[in-house]
Structures are given as structure tokens and as C-alpha cells.
Amino acid sequence: MKHLRNFCIIAHIDHGKSTLADRLIQACGGVSQREFHDQLLDAMDIERERGITIKSNSITLSYRAKDGQEYQLNLIDTPGHVDFSHEVRRSLMACDGALIIVDATQGVEAQTIANLYLAMDYNLRLLPVINKIDLPAADVDRVREEIDAELGLDPFEAIPVSAKTGLGIEKVLEGIVEKLPPPTGDPNAPLKVLIFDAHFDQYRGVILQCRVMEGTLKTNDAIHCMHKGCDFTVEELGYNQLKLVPKEQLSAGEVGYIIAGIKSVQDIEVGDTITHVERQATAPIPGYKKAKQVVFSSIYPMNADEYKELSKAMDKLALNDASLTYEKDSSAALGFGYRCGFLGLLHLDVVQERLQREFDIGLVISAPSVRYHVSMKDGETIDVDNPCQWSDPAKIGSVSEPYIRASIYTPEEYVGAVMELCREYRSESQKMNYLSVGRVEVVSEMPLSEVLFDFYGKLKTITRGYGSFDYVPIEYRETDIVKVDILVNGEPVDALSYLVHREKARARALHYCEQLAEAIPRHQFKIPIQGAIGGTIIARSTIQAYRKDVTAKCYGGDVSRKKKLLEKQKKGKAKMKQIGQVQIPQKAFIAVLAADRN
């Protein structure tokens, strides 16, 4: 066990985690030159195209150190985006140490601090690595100061590397062997295995990524999932080495995979503890938390005939993504669809793109919302994440919405603009921490619903790309939330209803009305498009009617002939408006909801 090292790589998004992982794999001979490609551990096309890690992945490497000993390194690559911090937490539970990467040009950023605290929660030994030292803007000395002041780690332990060119990679490997501790655990104790990830293979079923904490697991052992309460039989186990390499057994301290005839990711819970059916452990591994969906949106097929294909696609996607929740939903305007829960906006974006790419289905996505706690006057409390579930305002006593504590790291010259942006997004309290020369942390408490849309984009704009943002949910607070209905020719369109704070209701309703007025074609009669809270109209746009010059054939004669024809036309248009129906094209929904999300 003393020749084992279980570690992960954590950092802010785009600080070079996947590139460093590639260099480590190459240095240990984990892949041949012919088979190598960038982002080896990122299996999805979306991950490679966007340059982000969405799912954690692991690999077992062999490394011969300078002391002549052969070491087994179990590397777990983790996502950097705030939406996938749940993946990071599970990966940290399976490790004994971590490489914490800091960009030599950007310095310590928000997600770096957040991941540091997560690692400290699990008592991991941290080894700092300063990446991108080959760039002209790199300032290694300044970054060492930030590592000391902001992370509280030894700045002289930090290893300067260039993951792109491979400079300093050998020092990182030696640092892993010398500085990170070996795992602990008794191979003869009752079995405790942590499931830190899972994915679905169409031929083998669910493949579990696991770390054995205590005991020894062998092929054909009967196993029991302690949180889920279900039993399986191990068909195969072994190491991940880009390909699955079967072994006879996995002992305490080792990381590998398990195949046990599991049909769906929904049948197990990632973060669960596996033990033997016969000789069970007394308690599961501590630290397990279920993923919490914070953003909710409805997904409809663009063509109503594709609903069956969407149902199959959602079932298949859920096999690989245990964080996605969905239930059947319907809309008078868009037909049948699914109401889905996501970990954040990036998660929603990834799911939407995977559905379109992998299953070739055109989609309409409703405006995202958060979950509100609604206290009724009769004492009942309900959770609402869909405008269709909103009760009569006369029966509602109070509404609470989720708040977050946002940490924004920015250069000093942009502090004023950042604080103004926070106030614009209903920030309730702000404080500043001066971290180092020229760098400030702005801590702000604000509603989660406000940062869902364009907050991050605006932050990057006003700080010229230097600002970084991370948040943690804190509590629910009472607020003034209203339901806004969009009426087209006096009829409410349920797919466009939304929940919003009263202060922001008019501006957003006006935006919806203007977008619809541009997208809906003109009819023979005038079409009012209105935003309403209950019976009160708060915004309006009008689509003008096609006009026909009915008096063109009248030349000469008494003016009363023209008046008579115009009056007849006026009555005809009024009658048409009463019985005529406005057909809203699908592109109108897409235009409104896409513009709202952007």
C-alpha cells in the first residue's frame, strides 16, 4: 500500500487540468504516441470542443521513481465549472491528496478557493502547481505570493510547470510520490467501497468507478449498496488504463472499476457505499451528499411527432447522467414534453446539446427557473419550480427564494463596476477583502434566480475577462415573487409564463412582448401582445393588421360612399378579431426563449 498514490487535479476552469493530466499519462507511458490525442480523459465530443471537463474520469498509471521503486498512481481528473462541483466533491472523497493548479498569468481565482475548501473538508494533502509558465504574461513570483496569502499553502512547495510543453512534469511526478500520502485501510476488514462515478455501456451495463476504502473485493462476490439498499453480484473488476484491464481482486486503497449486471444508473446512487451481503460494514463511508438540482426548465420537441423519440432519448441520457431529473409535462401551445432539473445553466446547455447531437431532435427549451417555497394562508407550504403550479395570489401568504453567497475575484480597478453590477442584480449585502496588491474579493449575498441568466457574461465584460465568480447556496429568504402571463390576442400562452421578482417583471415582460411582435407574422386583424400580473397589464406590443384600400375603386361621387365602405371593413375586422385565431409559429417560441436565456 505504501507504493500507492490516489490523487486528483483541482483548479479553476481553464487553468490546464486536462492538459496536465495528458502530460502525466504520457510521462508514465500510459498511452502510445500513435493512440495519443489531446484531452485523453474527456470522452465526450462536447468536452473536447468547448475545452471543458464535464464528467470526472480516472486512470491507473505505473511510475518508476528516482528511488528505483515502482509506484501505482491513480489519477482522477475533475471538472472546474461551478455547476459540476458535485462531481468534484465525489472525486475528492476517493483521494488522499490533490494537485491544486494555479494559472501563472491569472493567479488564484474563485473556483480555486472553492475547491481548496472542498479538499480541506476531506483532509487532503495539497501540492500546488503553477501552470502556463511558458506564456509571456506569466508571473511566477506574484502567483507564489497569492498561494501563500490566499490559499495558505507553502509557496516554495509550488512546482512551476508548462503542461503544454511538458516542462517540469518529472518534478510533478516526484512531488506526487514524495509529498502526497499513501492510502490507509485494512484489507481484512469488512468491505467498504465508495462509488465516485458511473457510466452506461450498451454491452456491459453500468460500469462503476470505485475506490476500495476497507476490505477486499473479488469476482463473483455478492455486494450490497448501503444507501440504495439493493444487491448485485460482481461479474468483473479491475483497473482503468484507458481500456478496462480485468483483475482477480481489488484491495483496500486501490481504485478501479466494477461491472455487476446493473441495468441503469438510476438503479444505484453515485456516492453510495458498497459492502458484502454476508459480512456487512457497520456504517457507510461519511461525506455522502445527493446532487441538488437548482435550475428547472421544460423541454419540448420542436415537432410534436418526435415526442416518442424524445422520451427514448431522455431515458438513454439519464443512464449516463445521474444528476439529471425529469418528469412528464405538457403545454397547450407546445404539446407534450418533460420538466427537467439541472445542476446549473451549463448543465442545461450540455444536456440540450447532447439531445440535439446524439439523437437528432429539434428542441424548444422553456425559460429556466429556480425552486420557490410558497407558504399558503391556510398554513400549507409547497415547493414551486414551474409557473403552471403557481396558486391564486389571494391564497398565498408569503414566498421565499434561494439565496447564494457569491465570491467575485477582480482586479482593483473594476471593483466599482462589479459592486454596481451586484446591486443591479438585487444584491443584499457586499463586503470587500483585499487579497494582494491590485486584487480584491467582493463577497455578495444575492438571489440565485438573478445569476441564472447573463450575470456571468456581464461580469466578464466589465472586468475585461479578468473577473472570476463562484457561489455557494446559503438559505431561503422571503421575497416578492409574481407570476407573469403573456397574452396573445387576449389568450394566455402557458409556455411563456414565468416567475420573477416584482421589480423585474415589467422589463422582462416588455422584452417578451417585443420579441413575439417581431416573430409572429401579421394577420388580417390587429394582434395585441400583453404581459399581465393577474388582471393587471404591465407591458404591451401590437402587431399591426394587413391593410387593404377598400376605397380604391371609389372615384368621384359623395364622400359618404367611402365612409360606408370603411365602416363595413371596420366591422369585418372586429368580427375577425373575435373569432380569428393567432397561430404562433415554433420559431417565435425559440426566438423569445433563446433571447431570454442569452
Image (spheres, rainbow, N blue to C red):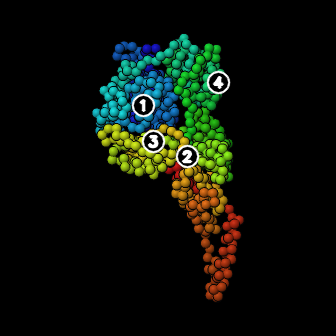
Mark seen at residue 406: 3
- Tell me the residue that label 4 is attached to: 229
Asked if the residue under mark 2 is in contact with the one under mark 4, i.e. CB atoms within 8 Å, the reply is no
Locate residue 547: give its quadrant: bottom right
Hey, what amino acid is under mark 1?
Leu
Tag 1 residue? 116
Q: Which residue is mark 2?
A: 478
- Closer to the chain start, of discs 2 and 3, is 3
Cα separation, mark 4 vs mark 2, equals 38 Å
Q: Amino acid at mark 4?
A: Gly
Query: Which residue appears at 69% of the width and 64% of the height?
Result: 580
Sequence-wise, the earlier of marks 3 and 1 is 1
Where residue 175 appears, as percent x and y from the top left, is 36, 22
Residue 519 occupies quadrant: bottom right
The reply to whether residue 299 is in sight is: no
Vertical placement of 323 versus 225: above or below? below
The earlier-in-sequence mark between 4 and 2 is 4
Q: Position of residue 347 (x, y in %)?
A: 53, 40
Q: CA distance from mark 2 to mark 1?
A: 32 Å
Mark 4 / mark 1, whichever is N-terminal: 1
- Residue at the extreme top: 188
* Residue type at the position of mark 2: Glu
